[in-house]
Image (cartoon, grey):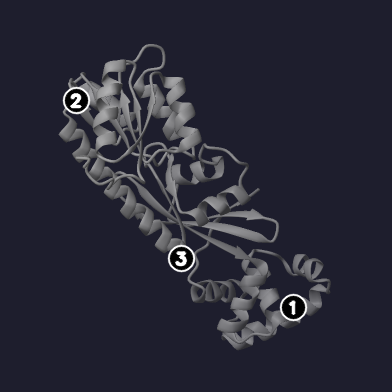
Amino acid sequence: MSSKPPDRHASHVVLIVDDVPENLAVLHDALDEAGFTVLVANNGPAALERARQLVPDIILLDAMMPGMDGFEVCRHLRASMVTRAIPIVFMTGLTEPEHVVAAFDAGGTDYVTKPVRQSEVLARIGAHLQTARLMNQARSALDAFGNAMLAVTPHNGRIVWQTPLARQWMGQYFEPADATPPALAAWLAGDRSAPLTVIRGASRLVFTVADQGSEQWMIVLREESDTARVQALMALLKLTQRESEVLHWVMMGKTNKDIGDILGTSPRTVNKHLEHVFHKLGVETRTAAAALALNRMRAGAPAVETV
């Protein structure tokens, strides 16, 4: 009868990156014995290729390798939307504080010192996989309730992770790229008290800061459209469809002439509808009507970026 323990980690894939064959062999055997599926790479470029193609659950990364060292490999992994959420544990004989700081600055999740103790590596891997599992569950729960969220690092605005719905919307509103979109980066670096709204045709993607922690900022995404807002105004304020359409475009800062052009009617007719809106809402000005409607819809005055 085999003495090998049950494959408790058989569904988890670990990528080991080290230029020393003996180190690879020792870690490979220990992790295989523990039930992990193990991938190996003996240099930086090979590690990047395997990580992008197979997306392991966690990476053990040697810090010092010829050519592309572990710090550079980590930066490349964190720059890619495909691999940036993978936990990365550095393996290093460098224990000076500046080297430890360099590992975390590059995007490392944790580190262990060489010579590596197998029991310590297994414990670290288990802890980080558990954290990643809980994070994935949280993201799935957010999406299940129709929410989209992403997390960014405060000092550089790099996107750390996204829920699947957020990733879908980001792909629709921005050119496919791994870097943080310029409009989002500028907003993150400036005044975030007002939401950022990115317009694409008749639809809008609204970004709002939900939490500003020391390590990550949580950003909530919400998609809006002209049709959805008009319907919301009709339901919330008991307006007719045409009145809601007029109020919607007032909220978007359009003049009566602009609204007439959009709706295919005259500015005078637009003004008549607006008078009805004022009467129903109990206000006297366009500004007051827009403010009341925005308040009812629980939306602020957003910063707008058109793409």
Residue type at numbered disc 1 = Asn
Residue 172 x, y percent position in the rendering: 62, 51
Pointer 3: residues within 10 angstroms few (<14), some, or many (20+)?
few
Residue type at numbered disc 3 = Ala
Q: Alpha carbon of mark 2 to alpha carbon of mark 3: how far?
A: 41 Å
Q: Confirm whether residue 206 shows in the render.
A: yes
Q: Alpha carbon of mark 1 to alpha carbon of mark 2: how far?
A: 76 Å
Residue 63 x, y percent position in the rendering: 30, 21
Residue at x 35%, y 23% (from the top left corner): 71
Q: Which mark, by number, is residue 144? A: 3
Q: Which mark, by number, is residue 271? A: 1
Residue designated by label 2: 116
Residue at x 34%, y 46% (from the top left corner): 216
The mark that comes first in sequence, 1 or 2, is 2
Residue type at numbered disc 2 = Val
Q: Which of marks 1 and 3 is in front?
A: 3
Q: Is mark 1 on a helix, strand or loop?
A: helix
